[in-house]
Image (cartoon, grey):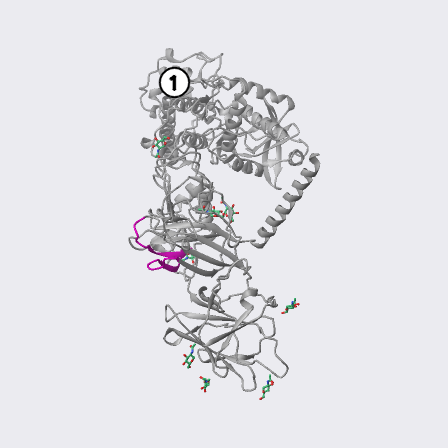
Amino acid sequence: MERPHEVLLVALIATFAVIHLSRADDQEGFISLDCGLPPSEASPYIEPDTGLWFSSDSDFIQTGKIGKIDPSLPKTIKTYVTLRYFPDGIRNCYNLSVKQGTNYLMRFTALYGNYDGLNITPKFDVYVGPNFWVTIDLENKISGQSEEIIYIPRSNSLDLCLVKTGTTTPMITSVELRPLANDLYITESGLLKSFKRYYLTSSDTILSYPDDVKDRIWEPKFDPEWMQISTNLQANNSNDFLVPQNVLKTAAIPVNHTARFNISEELDFPDDQIYLYLHFSEVQSLPIGDSREFDIFWNGQQFDKTISPEYLKTTTIYSTTPVTCKGGVCNLELIRTTNSTLPPLLNAIELYTVVKFPQLETNENDVVAIQKIKARYGLNRITWQGDPCVPQKFLWDGLNCNSTDTSTPPMITYLNLSSNGLEGTIAAAIQNFTHLEKLDLSNNNLTGEVPEFLANMKSLILINLKKNNLIGFIPQALLDREKEGLQLFVDGEHRCFSGSCDVTEKKIPVKTVAFVSSATFMVIIVVLVLIFVFKKKKKSIKLGGNVTSTNISEISIEMKKKKYNYSEVMEMTKNLARPLGEGGFGVVYHGVINGSQQVAVKLLSQSSTQGYKEFKAEVRYRRNSVYVKPMRFMYAFIVLQVELLLRVHHINLVSLVGYCEERGHLALIYEYMSNGDLKHLLSGKHGSSVLKWSTRLQIAIDAALGLEYLHIGCRPPMVHRDVKSTNILLDEGFTAKLADFGLSRSFQLGGEFHVSTAVAGTPGYLDPESYRTGRLAELSDVYSFGIVLLEIITNQDVVDQTRKKSHIAEWTTFMLNRGDINGIMDPKLHGDYNSHSAWRALELAMLCANPSSENRPNMFQVVSELKECLTSEISMKGNSQDLDSQSFPKVSMSYDTQDFPSAR
Ligand SMILES: *[C@@H]1O[C@H](CO)[C@@H](O)[C@H](O)[C@H]1NC(C)=O
Ligand SMILES: *[C@@H]1O[C@H](CO)[C@@H](O)[C@H](O)[C@H]1NC(C)=O
Ligand SMILES: *[C@@H]1O[C@H](CO)[C@@H](O)[C@H](O)[C@H]1NC(C)=O
Ligand SMILES: *[C@@H]1O[C@H](CO)[C@@H](O)[C@H](O)[C@H]1NC(C)=O
Ligand SMILES: *[C@@H]1O[C@H](CO)[C@@H](O)[C@H](O)[C@H]1NC(C)=O
Ligand SMILES: *[C@@H]1O[C@H](CO)[C@@H](O)[C@H](O)[C@H]1NC(C)=O
Ligand SMILES: *[C@@H]1O[C@H](CO)[C@@H](O)[C@H](O)[C@H]1NC(C)=O
Ligand SMILES: *[C@@H]1O[C@H](CO)[C@@H](O)[C@H](O)[C@H]1NC(C)=O
């Protein structure tokens, strides 16, 4: 029994849908906004008179207030109920989504309707993008003012701006956009603004949609000197202009059949240039022998063609060049030819004036970028509407542009977002400002690292990032730019550069946590394992708020660039032909990439996934020890670590060239250090020649520079935690580089969790005070460096149970106290050193290895002291022959051997 009902219902719905569809098709591309209509209130709705779909304007504007037209006004005026008015700001703009390059008829309507009860009609200006369009003055316009323009947007968004020019409040009732054919209503320059559009009829019907599929508004117009002729038949209106049938059904002819048919129009602005469009269609079937033929004169100039309109078929005649009308009065005359039997006829006229839009909009890339930045940081400044740069009087707060030349698109040259409470990372969109000269992001809450792309922005001459919560290094490339003259302002602690750091300015944050470098491998394994795991699961892990402010996808792009296939690894190592050594996590092989670059490939065996478990055990997290969470931590942690490893570039740090993870094959590719490690070189085994004293000093300086880079200028500073002679590697030019650095970074998850590891360093190099965390962790590195320096000077083993004093520092102290300075120096040097420089080095080493951390220098001081040693060594080299132990200064140091811990 229910079936027929259902069928009926379905049929009904189907019919309904068809009706809707056809309407929608008809109005394709139309934008019809009923301003001030609350979005919830039946938006969109069909306007009953026209069938046009209107919707609320609320999606296209963030500002303004909603007003309601005085309900006591006569009904004829209340075509609209609501409006939007703008009590705040000077310029308020709609951001309309349009199709770039489409020819639009755009209509702006304002109907005051005493919405505010003040009875003061507003007067204000309307701009399209950066260009003035029209002044709206509603005085004495009880039924409002409507303005039309034909405009081709240059991008997919169009700014329609209301600009306050006096004391009254700008307001708007509706905005309508109608796409037109692109080859119609063309002007040589500027744009066309509707001046008059009427059809010649004695009726009083205004025609628009749906009579006019393009929703042009045709006013009726008639004159006593005219006579109306008409037809009931449909005309062929299929020329491009698609003039409505009802316009073509009536026409006017002069009452005096022999007289001229003339029409004059007085312009609002006498100097306006004007374009004319005339539409003709013969409405009478002419008897044989009759003819209607006439010439058209426009301001006295004859159109080249004699017209004889066809029966029921549109002919449109229009001007292709603009004219100005003498005294601002334009004259049209239709004059019948001598052999025409009938007077001239005319159906409709359109007149357009030319408006100049001289100001080009701001460069589109810049606009997109600044919009991204606006959205990204949720900037809601009242001036940040419409075109960012122009007109200059409405330039957005905090911007500057080069906009002196209106014929080229202005570009943003200065971006000042200082003290705007910005949060998150430095927006990548900034790199799209190709002419940005000054960037000020100071005094915000920005987090994450200083992005490398800033260095690639060639136009930049000043960057201010002070007073933010940025972490990590300043990219080397940016520092290089600084050397070329870029003014770079960053908080002291962000500076990571060697040699010239102002240490006194340095603030070391409390939250530094040290990681022991032997965890490096583990971490990297975990990285790779996790990448592997996550790839398999195809799940994205969402990191809470400020887990990491660095964009993970950016990192993965960076990581992808450095990623190698297993087959590539096999190729670069010639199928693992040349092992270089073996470490705890796998074997290291020699390899070659890009034809000539030598690399060291650490291949991790399957069983090395053990490291993952170990690592997991090392991760400690406070407060909330829910077991599910470590994965999340580690992912965040790992992202930070890998990012760091791939980004840190310093001449005295061994760099990661790439990595491989493929079906359980894990490999890390490092730069190749052909001269092995320092310990090996000092040992003189494998036939390597004895290192000269000056070379040793240079190696010490290099290593110290690497360490200084880690300690000074980065927030949080990095602590190596495993400085030792086997971690100092030498390349073919004997440049020393620190290896296994860089995992000494802490990170905090949403302020709740603190991740750290506690893996022991290497016996003999361990600071007796052994600060693992806090600002003193760096001084533990200084201690280890002191031990390395002692190795360089003495060439003794760090721990040797066969010696009287097993620990190298104890032994040195013991020798010093005995006054046996010659016995301290490496006998392999055969006295070939300047004793002054040797003494200074020894003194420095002992200072670094001081059991009490407060007596130790920082790495900045170590570097400068070592540099002085080397200078004195070189300058006094000539005198070295006469020197013997006597030239050592008096031994004044005394060490309490009790203080030295026994090696662990
Ligand atoms: C303007 O509209 C375009 C297109 O809808 C959009 O991409 C852009 O973000 C908008 N701009 C603003 C300031 O809302
Ligand atoms: C209308 O005129 C055009 C040419 O102007 C012609 O191609 C078309 O066939 C005509 N349509 C009808 C219905 O006669
Ligand atoms: C009609 O116009 C012609 C030419 O302008 C003029 O000579 C004639 O007097 C006019 N006729 C009337 C009745 O006005
Ligand atoms: C047409 O022109 C004549 C003289 O040129 C003038 O007297 C008359 O008023 C004009 N008519 C219209 C409708 O402009
Ligand atoms: C009108 O006369 C001219 C010559 O005087 C002729 O060339 C033209 O074809 C004629 N027009 C019509 C419609 O007969
Ligand atoms: C802005 O500067 C750039 C580069 O100097 C130039 O290409 C562009 O034309 C300038 N624009 C204006 C409006 O001056
Ligand atoms: C940073 O954020 C904190 C709280 O989130 C706020 O108190 C502080 O004022 C902000 N600092 C700046 C410079 O905006
Ligand atoms: C920069 O502009 C290019 C081209 O317009 C665009 O593809 C890219 O996404 C933009 N980059 C950013 C970070 O906005």
Residue furthest to the front in view is 1
Task: State how many labels appear.
Answer: 1
Residue 602 in the image: x percent, y percent? 60, 29
Residue 718 in the image: x percent, y percent? 43, 28
Q: Is residue 142 magenta?
A: yes
Residue 380: quarter of image: top left
**Magenta stretch, residue numbers:** 117-144
**Residue with the mark numbered 1:** 820
Q: Is residue 485 left or right of residue 311?
A: left
Above or below, 147 against 796 in this view is below
Q: Is residue 307 left or right of residue 360?
A: right
Which secondary structure lies at badge 1? loop
Name the residue nearer the viewer: 166 or 763. 166
Name the residue nearer the viewer: 69 or 762. 69
- Can residue 418 be spotted in the picture? yes
- Can residue 130 be spotted in the picture? no
Residue 668 in the image: x percent, y percent? 58, 30
Residue count near mark 1 (Cα–Cα under 10 Å), binned few <14, some 14–19, many ≥20: some
Above or below, 560 against 132 in this view is above
Q: Is residue 342 magenta?
A: no
Residue 74 in the image: x percent, y percent? 38, 53
Which amino acid lies under the numbered mark 1 shown in the image of this protein?
Answer: Asp
Name the residue nearer the viewer: 253 or 134. 253
| Rendered-image quarter of ligand 4 | bottom left
Name the residue nearer the viewer: 726 or 293. 293
Residue furthest to the left in view is 167
